[in-house]
Image (tube, helix red, strand yellow):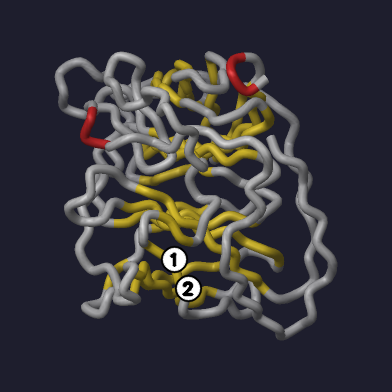
Amino acid sequence: MRTLQRLGAYAAGVAVLALGAYGLGSVVGPVGADETAASHGTHAGGTGHPDGGAHGATEEAEVPGGLQVSQDGFTLRPVTAPGRPGVEQRFSFRVLKADGESLTRYAPTHDKDLHLIVVRRDLSGFQHLHPTMAADGTWSVLLTFPAAGSYRAYADFRPGGADKGLTLGADVEVPGTYVPTELPPPSRTAHVDGYTVTMAGDLVPGEASKVTLRVSKDGRPVTDLQPYLAAYGHLVALRVGDLAYLHVHPDGSPGDGSTAPGPDVTFYAEVPSAGTYRLYLDFKHDGVVRTAELTARASGGEGS
């Protein structure tokens, strides 16, 4: 994963909205292919199953998802700055086209026109949100920034008529005194609300790696996971250091006649380089969506 950012104290009451991509670093990797290419396709920045053709290596290396505020003629433009932490507030933004007008036509991916991911740069405070769009193309959502600090906001979407999706990222600053959260060490087990998630498989740079996440509760496998956004699980991976973004969806889909509703949710994820990644698994059970978080290392392969 990435090294933790150590930020100084923020001046109380100041809200700075920083646009622009974070430093790209020296390693780039493949951005995800069209989600419609296979039944287990991914959002922008993700890759699919090795037999589906969605993850195929490109001849020309591309920048991983989420590192740029502008890409392919589209720009992420926040229009509101966060207030103080710990208070629910409305966060609004627009996706601008090359002509400066707002994008208003989107191709739905996994039941939504746009997915918003918000996370602090020390990889704490992860949120996966689904804002609503006004007629003028302004997206907005109520959210709470849990603590002061620098956050990365990712807009994960596919423009209407486009053959692939993309992920744009921008920094937003939440005023107050920043107290960093230490990144947990690599582990194959995560706990959330009485559930245990165990990871099998390894991330290999430059390859579609099979990763299976098993969900259990009170020591018993969960075999009745509920569909959430047309899947039994959603996996986001962020690279430590620059927060390169990878959003992967599982192999198979609910109701396809072969995919069981747990306890195992299998993904084929392609990370762009060796290093440390923070994994966030969204799953739904008993009517509640929960997020399990793990730290994982990717070594070997093309990025080592």
The residue lying toward the viewer, choosing from 226 and 282, is 282
Tag 2 secondary structure:
strand
Q: Amino acid at mark 2?
A: Pro
The residue lying toward the viewer, choosing from 132 and 240, is 240
Q: Quadrant of the N terminus?
A: top right
Q: Residues within 10 Å of mark 2 (few under 14, many from 20)?
A: many
Give the residue drawn at x 39%, y 30%. 47
When asked about the image quadrant of residue 16, the answer is bottom right
Question: Which residue position holds label 2?
Answer: 78
Q: Alpha-carbon distance for marks 1 and 2?
A: 7 Å
Give the residue drawn at x 23%, y 68%. 104
Q: Is residue 96 above or below residue 238?
A: below
When asked about the image quadrant of residue 258, the answer is top left
Give the residue drawn at x 32%, y 22%. 251
Tag 1 secondary structure:
strand
When asked about the image quadrant of residue 114, the answer is bottom left
Label pair 1/2, CB-CB below 8 angstroms? yes
> Looking at the image, is mark 1 or mark 2 nearer the viewer?
1
Residue 52 in view, yes or no? yes
Q: How many marks?
A: 2
Give the residue drawn at x 46%, y 60%. 70
Residue 208's label in the rendered image is none
Q: Amino acid at mark 1?
A: Leu
Residue 237 point in image, percent of width and height: 53, 37
Residue 232 point in image, percent of width and height: 32, 32
Q: Quadrant of the C terminus?
A: top right
Q: Residues within 10 Å of mark 1 (few under 14, many from 20)?
A: many
Residue 132 point in image, percent of width and height: 30, 68
Question: Which residue position holds label 1?
Answer: 76
Position of 204 with respect to 147 (left or right) is left
